Amino acid sequence: MIEPRIVKGFRDALPQEEHLRRQIMEKLADAFALQGYEAIDTPTLEYTETLLGKSGGETEKQIFRFKDAGERDVAMRFDLTVPLARYVTMHRDELALPFKRYHIAKVWRGEKPQRGRFREFYQCDFDIVGSDDAMADLDILMTAQTALVLLGVPAFVIEVNHRGILLGYLEQLGIAQHNTEILRSLDKVDKLGWQVVETELLPLISAEMIAKLKDFITPASDAWATIAKLRNLMGDHASLLVLENLFRQFKALDVAHFFTVNPKITRGLDYYTGMVFETFLLDDRALGSICSGGRYDNLMALYSKNPMSGVGGSIGLDRLLSAENILSQLNISERLRMMIYAPVDLAKVGALMRMLRDLGVVVEIYPGQKKVDQQTKYALRKGARLGIFVEGEGYTLRKFVERESLKDLSLEALIAHLKEHYLA
C-alpha cells in the first residue's frame, strides 16, 4: 500500500478554501478588467533558457528544471512576468500596444517553505508592456491600491522605491561594482534581519560602507521626510525626481495615505530596473508582501531586437489567504447554501431547485435515503445554512444555525421568507 504524502511546500485545497480562493480570483479579475487589463494565459512549461535568460543568477536556484521525454531542457514557470515577455515578443503584431494584461495562475519556486510562502502558489499579475512613461508606473500602483480596496483588504501600505536611487548611491560611494550582490542582500533585510545581511556584505565592502548603507535605507518619519533625507545624501538624482513626482500624483488623487517611501526595497528578481514596490498589512508585516512589482525596461531585449518597456505588479493570493485575521474582512459575499432532504416527489423538487438556483442559491439534493441526522450532518459539512423537507403539499424549512423549523409553508411563503431574511 502506498502511503499518501504531499511533497514539501505543496498543499491540497479543501472545498471551503478553494471556494474562497475562486471568489477572490473572480473579484480580482473584475477589478483588473474594469481598469482596462485583458486576460491571457501561457504554458506551465517553458524552455529553461526562456526563463533564465542569458544568466540564471538567483532565479536558477529556485526553478523546477528537468529534461522532458525528448531530452529538451525545460522548467516550470517561477513567475508570470518572464513568460509575458516571451508572449509579447511572439504576438506583438496581434496586440494593441501598450498592452495591458492580467494573468491569474499557478507558479512554482523551489524556495524554503514558510508561513505564507509555498513552492506552488497562485500569482495574480497585472502589467503594462510597451510604455516607458511614468504614467504607466502610476497606473500599476493605482491598480494595486484599487484592487486591494475593492477586495476589502484592511489597513495596508504600499511601500515604493526606485532601483536607480540605490544604484546611484552605490556609485557615489564607489562600490557600484558590487551592485547585483548588494541589491540581492538588501532585499533580504525584512526576511532575515540586518545581521544576516551585514554578514553577507562584509566580504564585499567595508564596515564603514555597510553603516552608510544601513543609514541610507532606513526610512524617515513619512514619505516626504524620506525623500528629503535621500536628497540630502545624493542630491537631485533623476530616479529620486521620478519617485517624488509619483508622490505628488498620489496627493492629487487623494490616495497618498496608502503609499510611503522605503529606500531598501529593491525586489529580489534581477530584471527590475526602475520603480519597485511591496505591500504590507499594517498589523501583520511579518507575513511579508501581499502585492509587489516594478518596472523592467530590459527584459524584452532577451527575446527581441526591438525591446519594449514593461511595468507590472502581482498580488500574492495564497499569502493573503494565510492571513486568517483578515479573511472575515474581505469583501466577499458568500452564496446561500441549502440542502433538500431525500425527496419522494422528484418532479416537485426539480421545480423548486430551478426556482432557488434562479435566485442564486446553491442547492442540492441529498444523494440517498439516510436517517435525518445523517443527512443533516452532511448538510453542515457542506456549509449549508438551511434544509428543506418536501412533505405532501407543503414545505418544512429547517434553520441549522437557529435550530428551529418553519412547517407547512406554501411555495410562495417559502420563497418570500428566503428573500426577506437571506437574499435581501
Image (tube, rainbow, N blue to C red):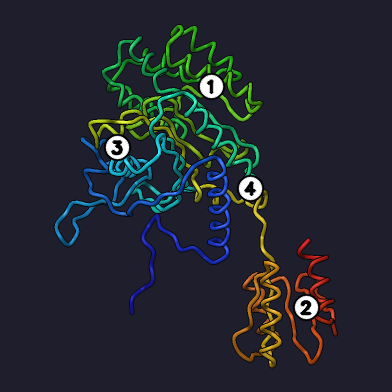
Which kind of residue does numbered mark 3 sit on? Glu
Q: Are the residues tagged 3 and 4 within 8 Å (C-beta)?
A: no
Q: Are the residues tagged 4 and 1 within 8 Å (C-beta)?
A: no
Task: Report which residue position mark 2 lands on.
Answer: 398
In terms of image quadrants, where is residue 382? bottom right
Q: Secondary structure at mark 1?
A: helix
Q: Nearer the viewer, mark 2 or mark 4?
A: 2
Between residue 107 and residue 117, name the one nearer to us: 107
- Please report whichever mark, 4 or 1, sits nearer to the chain's N-terminal start: 1
Q: Give me the C-alpha separation between circle 1 and circle 2.
A: 56 Å
Q: Secondary structure at mark 4?
A: helix
Compared to residue 314, the image places residue 376 above or below, namely below
Q: Secondary structure at mark 3?
A: helix
Q: Give me the C-alpha separation between circle 3 and circle 1.
A: 30 Å
Task: Report which residue position mark 4 lands on.
Answer: 326
Q: Give me the C-alpha separation between circle 4 and circle 1.
A: 29 Å
Task: Report which residue position mark 1 lands on.
Answer: 246
- Please report whichever mark, 3 or 1, sits nearer to the chain's N-terminal start: 3
